[in-house]
Amino acid sequence: MSLKLETERLNLQPFNKEDASRIKELANNQELASILGLPHPYELEHAEEWIAIQPEQIQKGLEYPLTIVAKKENEIIGTITMRIDKNNNKGELGYWIGREYWGKGFATEAVKRMIEFGFNQLDLNKVWALAISRNKASTIVLEKAGLQKEGRLKQNRLLHNEYEDVDVYGLLKFDYKS
């Protein structure tokens, strides 16, 4: 299975060790940290530790973390991951885009391609995602990509000492194919 996924403007591909400094640069943003629960400041060792475990995760089919690379700039602008629940044949999407690239449709494009990968290459029955309820941009991305809101989990996530509501989105293979 090739893990280089392509869209019109993006390449989604596995990380290299050298990508750690770019991830540190992009992730070291207070606004992003408040939504994702990332440490702030985001240090180089955070990125290096995360990237180091990825090859094994991919090899075991547990998780597919990929860089989001803008073709035009040939630069990483974010990351997207599909976490696999083998017992229930479903995948959880997670993603983020660097602050300077928000509002340009990159997240939607990457999410659509990852959904296609989940259903067509991984043969999943369901793709789902969580979004912090106050993160309206992320809920818009999920809806544009075809996921439907399945509900809200109240005070489900503790982020930086505050409980956050989380919206649950999902898409079944049957609905994706029809």
Image (cartoon, rainbow, N blue to C red):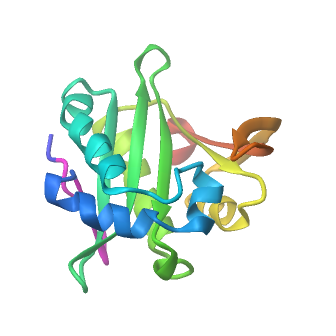
- Which quarter of the picture shows residue 73? bottom left
Front-lying residue, 158 or 103:
158
Q: Is residue 151 left or right of residue 100?
A: right
Please state the horizontal and vertical placement of residue 153, each as a whole percent of the image: 80, 36
**Could you tell me residue 151's position as x and y percent?**
79, 39
Q: Residue at x 32, y 42 (%)?
A: 50
Residue with the most extreme right position: 154
Name the residue rendered at 47%, 54% in the picture.
95
Q: Quadrant of residue 70?
A: bottom left
Q: Residue furthest bottom?
A: 72
Task: Please identify the quarter of the rendering in which residue 19 is found.
Answer: bottom left
- Nearest the camera: 76 or 20? 20
Q: Residue at x 40, y 41 (%)?
A: 82
The percent coordinates of residue 165 (x first, y second) are 80, 44
Residue 178 shows in this picture: no
Image position of 133 (left or right of 45): right
Count up the numbered dots: 0
Q: Residue at horizontal 23%, vertical 23%?
A: 60
The magenta span reads 3-13
Residue 123 in the image: above or below residue 14: above
Residue 98 drawn at (x, y percent): 45, 71
Q: Is residue 148 magenta?
A: no
